[in-house]
Image: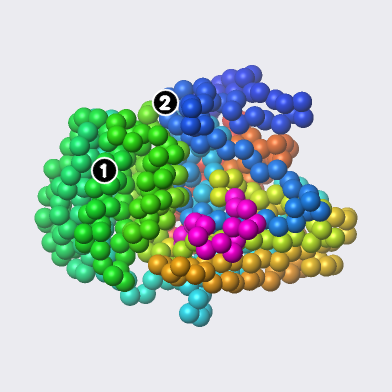
Amino acid sequence: MRFLPLLFLGLLTACSQDFSDSGAYSPQANYAGNDASGESVEPSGDQYGELVENDFVATAEEPVSTFSIDADGGSYANVRRFLQSDRALPPPGAVRIEEMVNYFDLDYPAPTSDIPIALNGEVADCPWNPDNRLVRIGIQGRDLGDAPPANYVFLVDVSGSMSSPDKIGLLKQGLYRFVDQMSDRDFLSIVTYAGWSGVTLPSTAGSDKVRIRRAIDKLSTGGSTNGAGGILAAYEEASRNFIEGGNNRIFLGTDGDFNVGITDHDELIELIEKKRESGVFFTALGVGRGNYNEHMLEQIANHGNGTYEYLDKSEELEKVFLHETGKFFTVAQDVKVQVAFNPDVVQSYRLIGYENRLLNQEDFEDDTKDAGEIGAGQNITALYEIVPAHKQDVQKAQAFTIDFRYKAPGATESVPLSLSVTDEGASFATASDQFRFVASVAAFGQLLRQSQYTRSLTYTAVQHWLNSANLPDPHGYKEELSDLIRLADPY
């Protein structure tokens, strides 16, 4: 009986889908409409960015592909909320495949030199189209070791829209967990905002956990939402207590419902871009539903040298605030990837996901062009599906070259790296466990987005591929993914 709501939603969606002459699914079909900023508005009132799936690109016309890495995990947690709590499929705009893949720890080899990131990759059969090949590009951030002292500023939305337990209640639980793991060398401030903004807790040493917890206890909600005013106040507080050589970071906890002050999307992005030059990193923590502005939070995190996470339940608090706090310590900044495909070997290619992280070719060596950050111990994955130029195996010639650029935190000049990947003709069954796992997650995401390139794909096939990947799962995240696939399958 639990699948009936999903089945009904699937039938309703199938009846209302908008198909072009080519039969491709239009991502706008499941939305109630689009507002003036280009955001897609779900019937519940939640707002998502417009994502148009990357097409295949003819290598002869455009042999070079360039993009910024994306270290966010918010999309996966939000998709999980739809499936577990709502028993409903997410709108396509909520599904960013790169964030689904990068939600998981893949146990990539760690750096063995002074370089803060290690590179790896492989090529094997594409499981949803065995005539094509799938390229996996992996990046692993260096483990933190001895953590530097930190200057944390928690910017908490205490407006009236935050009053429910899944909003301010969940944020307070997360703050308590975060305080538990603070060292005595760390400092934490709390800035709150509604129609006004102010410092609720001045910078306080991690050794004084009692005082910090008392400040958290007092957080309550009411009033309108001047998010921009709160952001300005948080940056002022972070700058006032800036630690040279330390980890300076703002955490914004909100549903993103900014309704007074600066509310225009482009103006908020411009504000964040100016403030990131201060050397303060930025993490957006999204909560709640109903008036949730997911697009806004993901974008200000992207432009603020930070990451975006969505908190949907207490288990996610454990992941974000206890198990994976290395994300909050940037080891490589403005990380870019550029892949040059050989047109004699590769007829066409498509980057799976990263739709809002694409860069122009000239951006790769432009050190003023912002890109994504990678945290301590964090891994990033990107996938390309490639169509061979000939039916013979693509490993008979060099199919592509992969270059990277990154900056040390706070540096102004980037460092080049390169990765050589040889196609050994591996089948999907003989590929690494990491390859089979990330391909399964990407396939799941494409099903949820109703991709035009996976028309014959089934949830049963994805489940089978996932079961073939044997990776460590100390916290049960990969096992939970298997449950989500079952929830999404309407049959």
- The residue indicated by pointer 1 is 230
Secondary structure beneath dot 1 equals helix
Question: For the residue marked with disc 1, what is the amino acid?
Answer: Gly
Q: Nearer the viewer, residue 342 or 61?
A: 61
In the picture, the disc for residue 362 is none
Q: Which segment is the magenta one?
A: 358-374
Q: Nearer the viewer, residue 429 or 453?
A: 453
Looking at the picture, does residue 63 appear above or below residue 223? below
Q: Which residue is rendered at x = 38% and y = 48% of the image?
A: 272
Quadrant of the rendered image containing residue 424: bottom right
Tell me if 415 is positioned left or right of 148 in this view.
right
Q: Residue furthest right?
A: 391
- Residue 48's x, y, as percent? 48, 34
Looking at the picture, does residue 397 appear above or below residue 302? below
In the picture, the disc for residue 45 is 2
- Residue 464's x, y, as percent? 64, 48
Q: Residues within 10 Å of mark 2 (few under 14, many from 20)?
A: some
